[in-house]
Image (cartoon, helix red, strand yellow):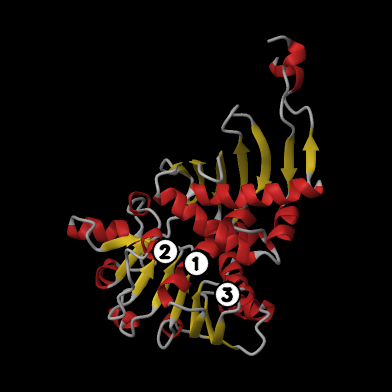
Amino acid sequence: MTDTQLTFPPLRVLTGADVLKQVDGHRETCVDVVRRAYLAHAAGDSSNPHSAFLRFPHRPSSRIISLPAYLGGEFEVAGIKWIASFPENLARGIPRASAVLVLNSTETGYPYAVLESSVISATRTAASAVLGAEALVGERRARRVGLVGTGLIAGHVWKFLRDLGWQIDGLRLFDLDRAHAERFAGTLDAAGVEVEVVDRLDDAFLDCDLVVLTTVAGEPHVHDPELLAHNPVVLHLSLRDLAPELVLAAQNITDDIDHAVRERTSLHLAEQQVGHRDFVHGTIADVLNGTLVRDPSRAAVYAPFGLGVLDLAVGQWVHAQLAETGSGAELADFFGDAVR
C-alpha cells in the first residue's frame, strides 16, 4: 500500500460539557444502553479484563484505575477508561474523580474518540444502579429512599430516579459532613418529595425501602444486621461499606462475580471469611433474564463492580449522537505523517 492510499480516522474530542448535554434529557435511553450492554456481556460477547489499580505509597487513599474492554454484538467497540480517585481533592475544592475514555475501532485498532469520562462513569454507574433497583423492587416506586454519601454519584442516581419517573415520598440524606448533606439537599429538584438530612447513618437505613450507598469508604463501617432486618433493596455502589455478616445474611447480586469478589470489596471480605462464593446468588443479567428472582424474605444487596463494557456502551452512544451534530473538536490529522 502506498502512502497515498493510507487513510487515518479523525479523532473526536468530547468535553464533559458535551457529554453532559447528551446525557441530560436522555436518561431513559442511558438505562436501556446499560441493560443491553449487560445482556451482551452475559452472553459472552465481550472481553472485560480485570481492572488494574495504580496506587501510590505516599498517597494510600488515592488511586488511578484502568478499565480496558471490548463489547461486541450491536456495539462492536473496544477502548479503555483511565479514572483517578483522589479524595483529598475535595479539600482543594475540586472533584474527587477525573477520567478519560478512549474508544478504538475493532477493525484497525485506531482510536477514534476521546471523551471526558467522569460524567460517563457517573452516568453508567447511576444507570446501572437504577436498572438494578427497578429489577429488584419490581416497579418504579419506593416509599422512602436513604442516601448514604451525598457526592457526585448520589446526585446522578437521584437525577435518574427523578427523570425515570420514580414515585418517591421521602428522601433521607446522611453524610459524615452534615453541611455537605445540607448543601446537597438544597440542590435537589425534588418537588413533592420530603427531603430530610439525618445525623445518624442508621436513619438512612431504617424504614427505607431503597438504600443507596455512595461513599468513599475503604473498609466496612456498617455492622449492625438490624439495619437490614426490614429487607430493603440496597444499592451498594461504593462496594466496601457493608460488613461481611450483613453480606452473608442478604441476597447478593452483582454484575460480574469474578470482578466483584476481589480488591477487598465487602463481597471479597465475606468470601475470605467463609471460604466460598455461594452467598453471591447471581448477576443483574440473571435478574433481567428471569433466571434469578428477588427473595422478599431478606434484604437484596446489589453491588455492581462497574464494568468497562458499560463505559464503552455509554461512551459509544454519546459519541454517535454528538458526531452526527458535529459537536466536539475533530482532529482530522491527529496521526499524520509521524506514523507513516
Q: Which residue is mark 2?
A: 288
Dot 1 amino acid type: Leu
- Between the C-alphas of marks 3 and 1, the distance is 10 Å
Question: Which element carries disc 3, helix, strand or loop?
Answer: helix
Which residue is rendered at x = 65% and y = 77% of the image?
Answer: 183
Choose top left, top right, bottom left or bottom right for residue 274: bottom left
Q: How many C-alpha atoms fall within 10 Å of the one at disc 3: few (<14), some, or many (≥20)? A: many
Dot 2 amino acid type: Leu
Q: Which residue is mark 3?
A: 161
Q: How many C-alpha atoms fall within 10 Å of the one at disc 2: few (<14), some, or many (≥20)? A: some
User: From the viewer's perspective, is residue 226 above or below residue 24?
Assistant: below
Q: Position of residue 47 (x, y in %)?
A: 44, 40
Q: Nearer the viewer, residue 308 or 196?
A: 308
Q: Position of residue 84 (x, y in %)?
A: 56, 49
Task: Say whether residue 37 is visible.
Answer: yes
Q: Quadrant of the N terminus?
A: top right
Q: Is residue 147 left or right of residue 321?
A: left
Which residue is rendered at x = 70% and y = 67% of the image?
Answer: 25
Choose top left, top right, bottom left or bottom right for residue 136: bottom left
Q: Which residue is mark 1?
A: 131
User: From the viewer's perspective, is residue 316 above or below residue 183?
Assistant: above
